[in-house]
Image (cartoon, helix red, strand yellow):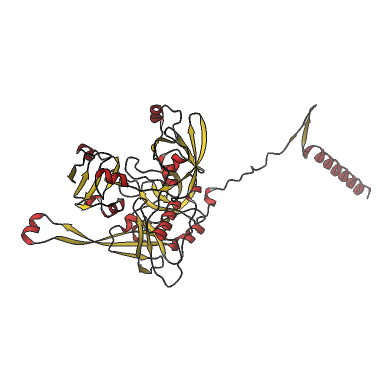
């Protein structure tokens, strides 16, 4: 009995000693280093960073796709074209031409439940019949409501018995470079197809040397033939662009696609429905976007912004106090670094609206409120044209014609035609105003009749 008690006592004392030693030396408490003016705590390193970043693989495109795919349609354009036969056949056989049926296709976006559709003008150009097929394979014959070749936007209308799924407009000005986007269309005549990418750039002019004033959203979302007129949407499923073009050597997608911003497309859509044509607002300035070479030429420090070289008398910019030599840096909240920044934003505005223009004059920055006026100019055959004013009609002794306010056609320059002359006839048909120019395409031109400042009529055959 004494032996058992002795053994138990030794074991108990050993356990107590072991527990004391473990508590004293094995469990390391928070260590504190104390100095005369601060106390520093050394904490265990098994912590995680606090981050608001979301991994790319967690980005969810499914909701945006669900909102969009059923509102994107296939657009088939059937046209009948007559090919002009050689004069030999026309003379000996009395044949006028040979007709051929051509079919083109693209995509479109339903933007209202009653069947209004936005697509590209080049998708339905020269149409004889337009057929629209929805994502559930229902087909409709569409009515062409109106077009705007300048922005490459067209509006169609289909009549369905039920309310149609449609896409809400988003704010393309608020879209940011690096933002995820989806391109939805009907490439290769497939049902609505979705591809993903990011916004690579904004206010992109595909060809700064052409006569158009482009301002596209550039993305790397895959866009191929048949995507033209389709939807570019953000991750909320809001329409921020109409897919329009790609740059490619092979004809297929190679990494860059371009979309008309939704703010421009929406404004054109609303103008066509309300006025039958696009209403364009004009600041009343002409000039050039700055770069290092032009900054040196104009002797200014800024290498970005729009340099005003000339003012149009009586229009908003002059009345607001702007003058030649000023540099436009911002319009409303849009920074102006390139011409596309300026033209793209103004394309979303109407005549009668006012914008706040921030401009630099010398070393000081100023702000003015400018009322936009209705634009009455057109670009045709590399010429800028305007309607005639009464005093110009009197000076040229004519009751019709359009005034050449800008000449970028070197061949016509070499033929003796220059700024300040008039166009009075196209294909020997009188031209009354710039609206008449919409009825002519470059391929259909055979001759232009000019009236120069000396009063001479000059007929120029078009090569």
Which residue is more in the foreground, 294 or 372?
Answer: 372
Q: Residue furthest left?
A: 92
Which residue lies at the image location 18% right of the left edge and 43% below the top edge?
458
Which residue is more in the foreground, 170 or 401?
Answer: 401
Figure check: 141 above or below 343: below
Q: Is residue 112 left or right of residue 132?
A: right
For the C terminus, the quadrant is top left
The image quarter containing residue 83 is: bottom left
User: How far from the left and from the top, in percent, is residue 70?
Assistant: 44, 63
Is residue 387 among the parts visible in the rendering? no
Q: Is residue 380 left or right of residue 87?
A: right
Figure check: 318 above or below 274: above
Q: How many marks?
A: 0
Is residue 373 among the parts visible in the rendering? yes
Q: Residue furthest bottom?
A: 161
Figure check: 42 above or below 226: above
User: How far from the left and from the top, in percent, is residue 190?
Assistant: 36, 61
Which residue is more in the foreground, 357 or 192?
Answer: 357
Q: Is residue 235 left or right of residue 431?
A: right
User: How far from the left and from the top, in percent, is residue 298?
Assistant: 40, 28
Which residue lies at the image location 38% right of the left edge and 27% below the top edge?
297
Q: Is residue 350 left or right of residue 406?
A: right
Figure check: 118 above or below 455: below
The image quarter containing residue 97 is: bottom left
User: How far from the left and from the top, in percent, is residue 356?
Assistant: 50, 43
Which residue is more in the foreground, 147 or 402?
Answer: 402
């Amino acid at each position: 009995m004494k032996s058992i008690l002795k053994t138990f006592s030794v074991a108990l004392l050993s356990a107590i000693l072991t527990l004391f030693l473990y508590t004293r030396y094995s469990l390391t408490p928070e260590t504190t280093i104390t100095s005369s003016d601060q106390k520093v705590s050394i904490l265990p390193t098994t912590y995680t960073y606090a981050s608001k970043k979301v991994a790319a693989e967690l980005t969810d495109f499914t909701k945006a796709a669900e909102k969009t795919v059923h509102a994107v349609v296939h657009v088939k354009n059937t046209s009948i074209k007559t090919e002009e036969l050689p004069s030999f056949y026309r003379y000996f056989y009395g044949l006028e031409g040979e007709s051929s049926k051509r079919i083109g296709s693209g995509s479109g976006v339903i933007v209202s439940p009653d069947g209004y559709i936005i697509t590209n003008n080049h998708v339905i150009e020269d149409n004889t019949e337009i057929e629209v097929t929805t994502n559930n394979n229902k087909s409709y014959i569409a009515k062409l409501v109106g077009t705007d070749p300048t922005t490459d936007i067209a509006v169609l209308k289909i009549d369905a018995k039920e309310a149609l799924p449609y896409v809400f407009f988003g704010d393309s000005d608020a879209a940011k470079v690096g933002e995820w986007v989806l391109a939805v269309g009907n490439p290769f005549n497939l049902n609505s197809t979705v591809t993903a990418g990011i916004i690579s750039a904004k206010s992109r002019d595909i060809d700064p040397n052409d006569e158009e004033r482009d301002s596209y959203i550039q993305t790397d979302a895959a866009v191929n033939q048949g995507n033209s007129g389709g939807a570019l949407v953000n991750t909320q499923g809001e329409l921020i662009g109409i897919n329009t073009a790609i740059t490619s050597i092979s004809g297929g997608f190679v990494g860059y696609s371009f979309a008309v911003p939704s703010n421009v497309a929406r404004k054109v859509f609303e103008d066509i429905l309300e006025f039958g044509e696009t209403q364009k607002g004009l600041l009343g300035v002409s000039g050039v976007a700055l770069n290092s070479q032009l900054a040196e030429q104009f002797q200014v420090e800024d290498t970005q912004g729009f340099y005003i070289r000339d003012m149009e008398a009586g229009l908003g910019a002059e009345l607001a106090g702007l003058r030649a030599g000023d540099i436009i840096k911002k319009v409303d909240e849009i920074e102006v670094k390139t011409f596309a920044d300026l033209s793209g934003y103004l394309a979303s505005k109407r005549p009668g609206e006012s914008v706040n223009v921030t401009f630099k004059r010398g070393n000081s920055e100023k702000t003015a409120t400018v009322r936009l006026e209705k634009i009455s100019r057109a670009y045709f055959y590399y010429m800028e044209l305007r309607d005639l004013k009464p005093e110009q009609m009197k000076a040229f002794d004519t009751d019709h014609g359009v005034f050449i306010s800008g000449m970028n056609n070197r061949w016509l320059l070499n033929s003796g035609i220059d700024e300040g002359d008039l166009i009075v006839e196209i294909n020997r048909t009188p031209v009354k105003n710039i609206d008449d120019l919409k009825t002519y395409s470059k391929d259909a031109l055979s001759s232009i009749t000019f009236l120069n400042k000396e009063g001479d009529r000059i007929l120029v055959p078009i090569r």
